Amino acid sequence: MNNFRKSFFMLCWLICFMPASSLFAFAGDSLLPKSSSRDVKQREVRNYIRPTLYMNFFGTGSRIIKSDPSFPSQIVTHKLGNYKFVTANIGMYIPLYTNTKFSKNDSSTINTFHLLMTINGLSDQPQFAGLSRQHKLYKLGAGLRVIYGFGSKFILFVDASPYIVGDKLDTKQTQEFRFASSAIFNVMLSPSFSIRGGVTKTFLFGNRNYLPMLGFRIGKLDSKFYFSIQFPRMVSFNFQPTPKFSFSLYSKAYGGLYNLSNNDSLYIFGDSIIQLGQSGISNGLRLDFRPSPNFSFFLAGGFSVNNHIWLYAPSFNIRNHSKPFTPYYKGAPDPAIFINFGMTWRFGKAKKSSGNYLMYDIFDLNNTMDPGDNNAGPGNGDIRNNTKESEMQKVQYKDVSDLIEDTDLY
Amino acid sequence: MKKIIFLLSFVFAFLANELSAQNAGVSPKGKSDSAQTASGQERVQALKVAFITKRLNLTSDEAEKFWPIYNDYQDKRDAVRKKLQSDYQIIREKSEQLSPEEFTRIADEEVALKVKDAALISEMNEQLKKVLPPKKLAQLYVAEEDFKKELIKILTEDKANPDNKKPK
């Protein structure tokens, strides 16, 4: 069993059992006093953001790779053969500390500070039909993020996502530390319109990029329709007909930068490790189903376009005096059909945020900027869309028992 | 690895309901109602937001400031009421085992919690004075009462005519 598998098991174990035992109540737990003792402390709800776990699976069909007609490129293209891409991702964020304070200058404005831990694991499998052994790439990380909502319009978001990447074919040599980060400032000009600006260090586009992060949203996050552009991550048009179902037409980036064992001699001048950069844009339709506040899942499909593969070799760049991550090979896989599905679990209770659109923007920002720089987040299942008054008929006594007093009955 | 991920997802689908049993209740059939209740409470909260927004006719600026204050008040009030419910539960279930001193302590605590409840609404009222015009502030309390009455009406009708209940 190699190191990757051990790390993956360790991560799963941490995700499954550590938070479960320290953060959540088990079935036998109750807020009511236990028989043995009267002094049972109430569990105080402190956080607006609930601990959230999500999983994502993405796969494309097989297609040919096109490259420039130069002889060296054609050799690599021929060696690689057809290309198919499969990735699985598991991630989590856990609120570590939340502070809610009324502003000193204006005691009618609440400022909220959120500190979250993020955990992420990813298994990436670029499958090249021409290679005898397929590379299994991985990425494991744990990071921190800070979100500060202040006034009634502003949010500051800072995310630090350190992680390790490697190739299971040669874990020892290929494992490397990387660091992705983002700093974003969000202004909610009205509940129906917000803008974002910032910077992000990302490997999503198959290289080490420092990019501006610019975005805006039109439409309320809890309304039937809203449109959002979050460059460079995604563009989406969302339709939420009921609180349980939502549809989204979207276009979003995917990809990464990995170390690759050069056991296939993809670079013939002796480097034992090369780098693979890959990226694409997935254009598709996504259906989200949210059967309960604790669980949601989605299914999406569409076309993966604008696909690129780059191969980098350190000795190539040294020899040519070029910048790091200058590719010696560029390939363009044809568009392909993709399928994407995932699940999200949210645990415990959260402080009330109904009607608080700045908090909705905090949720949206937190979900859009997924842990781990994979652009595969949990979705906005923590924002419930508007409820029709006709739903009033579904209310049951146990839902409202603590709201009603005897004097209300006469 | 795929098998592991699938297995984990199913395990978590099961655990999601169990782990979030912080507000667990037990139905007459003995099953945990936690997930259903959480969903129900969320629905009531969403309905309340719709009801109050419509009644008060809040502008965007007013809503931006109103809801954080009101939600904060509700969270604090919920905590107080849960503590009160917990005290009531003790009296119901353990009255044979409690000493007179403990009864006194619980009674004092109940009164203190009710005073705190009143202090919370007073605090919220002061904060909302800076956010809402007096007319809307006064209408808020009427809207809260009317919302509660609307709920009671529905629940009473359901109980009186169980056949009217829509199938789920």
Image (spheres, helix red, strand yellow):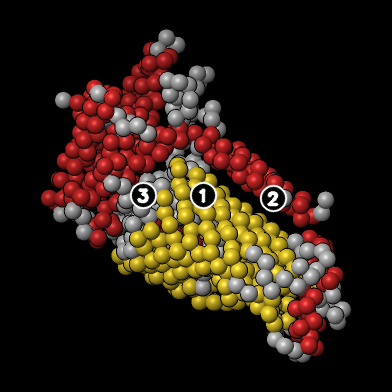
Tell me if mark 2 has few (under 14), some (14-19) or many (20+) residues whose alpha carbon lies within 10 angstroms of its own.
few
Residue placed most toward the observer, B64 or A96: B64
- Mark number for residue A275? none
Residue placed most toward the observer, A346 or A93: A346
Tell me if mark 3 has few (under 14), some (14-19) or many (20+) residues whose alpha carbon lies within 10 angstroms of its own.
some
Q: CA distance from mark 1 to mark 3?
A: 15 Å
Task: Give the percent coordinates (x, y) of residue A343.
Answer: 55, 49
Q: Is residue A370 visible?
A: no
- Chain ID of residue with mark 1: A
- Identity of the amino acid at label 3? Thr
Residue at 87% over, 78% down: A270
Q: CA distance from mark 1 to mark 2?
A: 18 Å
- Identity of the amino acid at label 2? Lys
Q: Which residue is mark 3?
A: A242
Instruction: Confirm whether circles 1 and 3 share one chain.
Output: yes
Task: Give the percent coordinates (x, y) of residue A351.
Answer: 40, 45
Q: Which residue is mark 1?
A: A297
Q: Dividing the picture into quarters, in which one does residue A151 lie?
A: bottom left
Earlier-in-chain disc, 1 versus 3? 3
Is A383 above or below relative to B24? Answer: below
Residue placed most toward the observer, B54 or A318: B54
- Chain ID of residue with mark 3: A
- Mark number for residue B2? 2
- Identity of the amino acid at label 1? Phe
Q: Residue furthest left?
A: B135
